[in-house]
Image: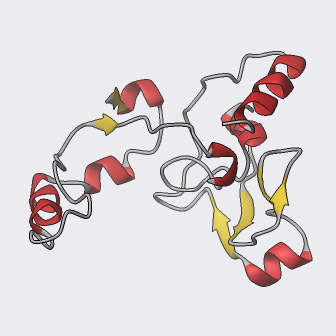
């Protein structure tokens, strides 16, 4: 678990996840083992495995960063408004195309200025050089 202060992200999701919500998820469909076990109220985020990360955009817990290349930018340089839901892969930026007429026609508008939509924090890798960022993205595409 990574403390929310270290991640530097929007607290909205952490704050809405209460002990009562965890208890309800743990009790959901107890006759089936669908992975609804062991939920608990913590003050942070659990890092997930990176296998297939190239296909899991948009990124962050709230889908507020459209591509991995955008995630490697400082938060103030990340897209403020984009469209989620268009399923055309962007192999250069690693994610899905999130701008343009088709993305707007198919996707839903995401505005990072709305409560719970922030793309702040997650500074890991933002200080890399551009060649190092490109090398990292090439590696992440292999997972």
- 88, above or below 142, in the image: below
Colour mode?
A: secondary structure
Residue farthest to the bottom? 105
Name the one closer to the observer, 42 or 36.
Answer: 36
- The answer to which image quadrant residue 50 occupies is top right
Q: Quadrant of the C terminus?
A: top right
Q: Is residue 4 above or below residue 131?
A: below
Tell me the quarter of the picture where residue 80 sits.
bottom right
The image quadrant of residue 11 is: top left
In screen coordinates, is 138 left or right of 11?
right
Residue 25, percent from left and from top: 17, 63
Residue occupying the point 73% across, 48% down: 67
Q: For the point 75% across and 41% down, which residue is it? A: 70
What is the total number of numbered labels drawn onto the structure image?
Answer: 0
Q: Residue 54 at what x, y percent from top left?
A: 69, 46
Q: Give the image location of residue 111, x and y in percent.
A: 64, 63
Q: Position of residue 17 (x, y in %)?
A: 24, 54
What is the quadrant of the N terminus in the image?
top left
Q: Is residue 127 above or below residue 70?
A: above
Q: Nearer the viewer, residue 46 or 7?
A: 46
Residue at x-position 89% and y-position 19% = 131
Q: Nearer the viewer, residue 112 or 107?
A: 107
Relative horizontal placement of residue 45, taking residue 116 as reference (left or right): left
């Amino acid at each position: 678990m990574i403390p929310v202060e270290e991640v530097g992200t929007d607290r909205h999701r952490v704050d809405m996840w209460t002990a009562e919500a965890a208890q309800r998820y743990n009790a959901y469909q107890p006759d089936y083992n669908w992975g609804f076990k062991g939920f608990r109220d913590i003050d942070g985020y659990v890092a997930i495995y990176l296998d297939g990360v190239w296909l899991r955009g948009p990124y962050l817990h709230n889908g507020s960063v459209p591509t991995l290349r955008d995630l490697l930018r400082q938060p103030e340089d990340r897209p403020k408004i984009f469209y989620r839901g268009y399923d055309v892969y962007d192999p250069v930026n690693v994610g899905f195309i999130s701008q343009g007429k088709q993305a707007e026609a198919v996707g839903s508008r995401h505005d990072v200025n709305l409560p719970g939509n922030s793309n702040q924090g997650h500074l890991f890798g933002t200080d890399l050089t551009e060649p190092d960022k490109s090398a990292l993205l090439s590696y992440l595409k292999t997972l």
